[in-house]
Amino acid sequence: MSAVVSHTIERSVGEAADAAARLIERCVQHAVAELQASETKAEAERRKEVSEAWRAMLTRREDWGQRFPGLLQAAIEADVCGDGPAPTETGNSGFAALTLVDDSEISRKIESTRLAQQLTAMLERPLAELDPLMSSALGLDGIQPQRNPLRPGIYAQVLRKLVEDDQSEPGWTALWLRSMVKPLAQGLDELYRGQAKLLTDAQVHAADYKVLTTPGKAPAAAAPKPAPLAASAPAVGPAGTAAVGTAPAPVAAAAPAAAAPAAVLPRLDAARLQQFLARDEAQAHEALGADFLAQAEAELRALEERVDARSFDAQAAQQHRDLPVVDRPARSVGTDSPLPTERWGEYAAPRERSLVRGRLKTQARELGQVIGLEAVRQVIDKVAEDPRLLAPVREAMVALEPSLARLAMVSPRFLSDDAHPGRQLVERVAQRSFKYNDEFSPEFQDFVGTVAETVGRLNQLEKFRNATPFQAALAALQTEWAEVDAEEQDKQRKALERVQFAERRQKEAEQLAGQWKQREDLRAAPQPVQDFVLRTWSLVMAHAKLTHDSQEDDPGGHRAVVTDLLWSVNRDATLHEPARAFALIPRLLQKLRDGLASLGQAPSDSDAFFHELENLHRPVLKLRARHRHGTVAPPEPPPPTSVAPQRPAEQPWMPEAELRAAGFDDTHPSDFHDLPPEQRPTQGAAQSLGDRAAEEVLGRLEPGTWVDLFAHSQWRRAKLAWAADKGTLFMFLSQGGQPHSMTRRSLHKLVKHQLLRPVLGDGVVPRALQGLAQPSPLTA
């Protein structure tokens, strides 16, 4: 054993001993409270015994707190050095070990064994992470959970010795031990996770399980080195998946005739699972031997005696409800988490889900089935840790585990087949949930309620012959989702058509404006007239061209209006031909107003331009008045003019009603600092990104990207539905088909001030498969 590893083991043992005093204090406190509660419910003849038991425990609390750490450290050190007794906590020592022992000793051993089994069953998940690391740190050949110096059996033996050394009343010991199971399991859960992190940080690499053939049989060929699993690796081999709609042959039928029965430990590391899912390994079809089945039966018995240490905390689930959705911390959910019973029913309890897994292990006949069961548990555990999913969605995945485990018995590798209905159901529900960012919204509650009904129906099926029930469940969900989406999609389509038409009209208008800029008479025109022709009348002509059924280049004759307008503001030309001007100007004004009306512009929007135009026409109109009165004098010079304000060129022009319908008003003001104080997000937005970082985010946006968008004083989950070819215009759609349109400049400001935040929408199951070998972000 290397010096580094030895030091790490010493440190691990030392930390366990240091935590022992706090652990026993917690156990006593919890046990006393539990016994006090049971005293009030106990029958009269038993009530006195329970009362005396918890009172006696209180008097021993200080003494136990002082003695327990020393006893524990001595037991652990003896176990590490090999000086301890042969492990008997799993109950496999046989009756021979109990010969010539009195009844009280037998009872004590049975009580200790039961306590160890209960703890092991309750701590399955953290032990699955710690055992491989501890075996490797000890230099053992493969994973040997029975050699883990911090295993539950050691704690069970020390705790039994501690309480028995007091020569207490015979019935008290059993009461004390049973009432300390839950707090002891909770404390060991924290300890094991901490020690797994300690070993990982010390560069200890997890050991692998070994598959052992029965005596007299040749060992199976060594499995190839595990390879990383591709994001959507196809299933390999005839037993990988079950054909939908057909009853597959029993899995055991695919085993080679010469395969030897195998004994295999129940927990498997991530590398082995990836290897199994990525390709067909020879050992997957090996029959399971009697040793494994006996071990599975023992585990099942321990699970049946197990009592869940925790219940769902509804208050904790509600504690961050008042925070903005982007500031709420992700609530922890895992395969060992209690779930709300009113939504998830029987399988809300971790014990019930574990029982399904345990019973299936006893029914397994091939090694591949056992690996498939563990693959389901670990992948669902990873999905349940995905912070992109709202907590109730992650709860749905955990609640679905029993059905997925039953599916793994007939299709062990279904998780590696992205077309398999079982995997598709998980992925489609997850992807659909990206529409929502608030678990308390009525829309999301409707969604998760439908998912819960589907999960409940699948979990009622005790056995699957194939994937047909999952295919039917997914089809039913998608049909219901399509009905919900129908009205929303119609609204989205109309909003998108408006924006896309406005963009086409703007492009056509810009092309016309580019042609007109070459005209000499336009360059000589006053600035207000130039702006009107290039920015507004070009839109009128483009609109007529795009909406007219004919293929005419200029339906409505709008190009001729430009010629007349430019001549009418040429002071020298109109004064030279006043009669023509007098006849032309009234008709010109009417054509201009008619054209603007066809565009959808309100009359008041063009008042400023017509006022300027009136000033430009005043010299020739005054000349006509002077002719009428018989006096002719030199015309006055035109008054100075001003340029009317125009919309930014990057945003296509739309009438105000269409701007609102397309959602352009939702993102104004787009700068965080322009928002009223009462509308500003509470966190995050003040920490602005740099311009370069904001542009990098913009560069990753593409249609289909989900974002959290701050609009109308709240955070909304929206999807980028459309972006203009040149990236100058964007439309997002949020719940109910509500559009949110913006220019690139507005979008840049939103991203910069974190009022728009992309949400990664890549596959949930592929991410979970790729993350199997990585430590959990919530437990590391």
Image (cartoon, grey):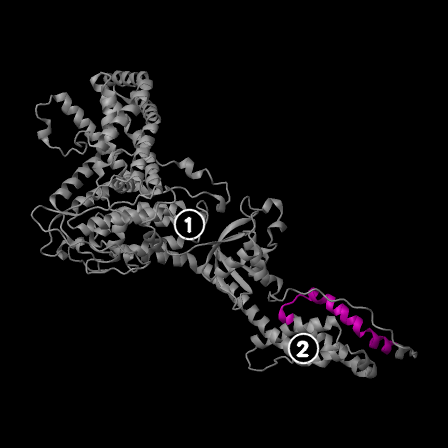
Q: Nearer the viewer, residue 715 or 495?
A: 715
Whether 68 is among the magenta residues is no
Magenta region? 597-625
Q: Amino acid at mark 2?
A: Lys
Task: Tell me: 488 left or right of 752.
Answer: left
Point out residue 336 in the picture as x, y percentages from the top left corner.
Answer: 31, 40
* Residue at mark 2: 517
Q: Quadrant of residue 596?
A: bottom right
Quadrant location of the N terminus in the rendered image: top left
When the figure is inspected, residue 89 is found, relative to residue 560, above or below; the finding is above
User: Which class describes the residues within 10 Å of circle 1: few (<14), some (14-19), or many (20+)?
Assistant: some
Q: Quadrant of residue 335?
A: top left
When the figure is inspected, residue 491 is found, relative to residue 25, above or below; the finding is below
Q: Nearer the viewer, residue 211 or 44?
A: 211
Task: Tell me: 318 left or right of 684.
Answer: left
User: Which class describes the residues within 10 Å of circle 2: few (<14), some (14-19), or many (20+)?
Assistant: some
* Residue at mark 1: 388
Secondary element at tag 2 = loop
Separation of marks 1 and 2 at Cα, in angstroms: 52 Å
Q: Quadrant of residue 513?
A: bottom right
Quadrant location of the C terminus in the rendered image: top left
Whether 615 is among the magenta residues is yes
Q: Nearer the viewer, residue 662 or 277?
A: 277
Farthest residue to the left: give it: 216
N-terminal of the two: label 1 or label 2? 1
Point out residue 635 in the picture as x, y percentages from the top left corner.
Answer: 87, 76
Residue appearing at x 55%, y 81% in the figure: 550
